[in-house]
Each structure stands twice: as C-alpha cells, then as structure tokens.
Image (cartoon, rainbow, N blue to C red):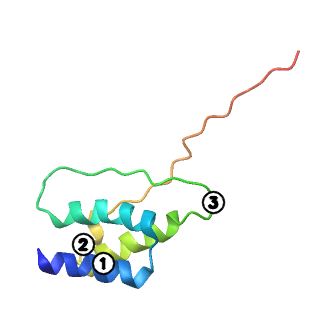
Amino acid sequence: MEKEQNIIDSTVFDFLLNIDQERAFCIIANHASTRKTWTTYMYIGGMAGTGKSQVIKTLTAFFEKRNESHRIVITAPTGNRHRSRSRH
C-alpha cells in the first residue's frame, strides 16, 4: 500500500493540483489502489477554468505510472437537451 500512496503523492506533486482537484483525484486513485472489484464512476464538472482537464490529465498519468491505462475511460457527454421554445 505504501508504493501506491507514493505514486498518488508524486502524481499530485507533478501536476500541482489545488485542494479541490486533489480531492477529486484522490477519490479515484485511492479506489484504484485497493483490490475492490466494483467499478467507480465519477462525474467531474464545473465552470470553464476550474481545472477539470487538469484532473483528467493527472488521472491519466496516474494510471500510466501503474501500467494500467486500460482501467480508465473518459467520456464527455453533453448532458444538455435543447429546449424548443415556441413564440406566440
């Protein structure tokens, strides 16, 4: 477990994450470091400039350091539906 924590710590250091980014990263990294069999799904959202891409880059690097790139899938669904408004 110490080796896994060293990888987490060094990855956080390499990417200079702020506290919120680090929290999101650590939730996934700590789960990935356990031998649990269930899948974790996490939504990372926020306004432009909040560091979503930085967290994704950090997670990608973390899984690469562990030679487990196959364990992360990144999607970008829009999640928004257009509302049609009729004008009368």
Q: Quadrant of the N terminus?
A: bottom left
67 on left or right of 84: left
Q: Nearer the viewer, residue 28 or 78?
A: 28
Instruction: Say which element carries label 2.
Output: loop
**Residue occupying image coordinates x 37% and y 83%:** 13
Q: What is the three-letter code of the residue carrying label 3?
A: Ala
Helix or strand or loop: what does disc 1 sit on?
A: helix
Q: Position of residue 76 (x, y in %)?
A: 50, 54
Residue 79 higher or lower than 6, as above or below: above
Crowd band around label 1 with a 10 angstrom C-alpha radius: few (<14), some (14–19), many (20+): some
What is the residue that sits farthest to the right in this orientation?
Answer: 88
Mark 2 nearby-residue class (10 Å; few <14, some 14–19, many ≥20): few
The amino acid type, in three-letter code, at marker 1 is: Glu
Determine whether label 1 and label 2 are within 8 Å by CB. Answer: yes
Find disc 1 in the rendering and name its residue.
Answer: 64
Residue at 29 percent across and 61 percent down: it is 28
Q: Nearer the viewer, residue 53 or 70?
A: 53
In the rendered image, which residue does mark 3 sit on? 48
Determine the CA span between mark 3 and mark 2: 29 Å
- Give the label on residue 68, or none: 2
Q: Residue at x 37, y 51 (%)?
A: 42
Q: Which residue is painted at 51% across and 63% down in the image?
A: 52
Q: Position of residue 63 (x, y in %)?
A: 29, 73
Question: Quadrant of residue 27 in the image?
Answer: bottom left
Horizontal and vertical percent for residue 75? 45, 55
- First-in-chain label (3 vs 1): 3
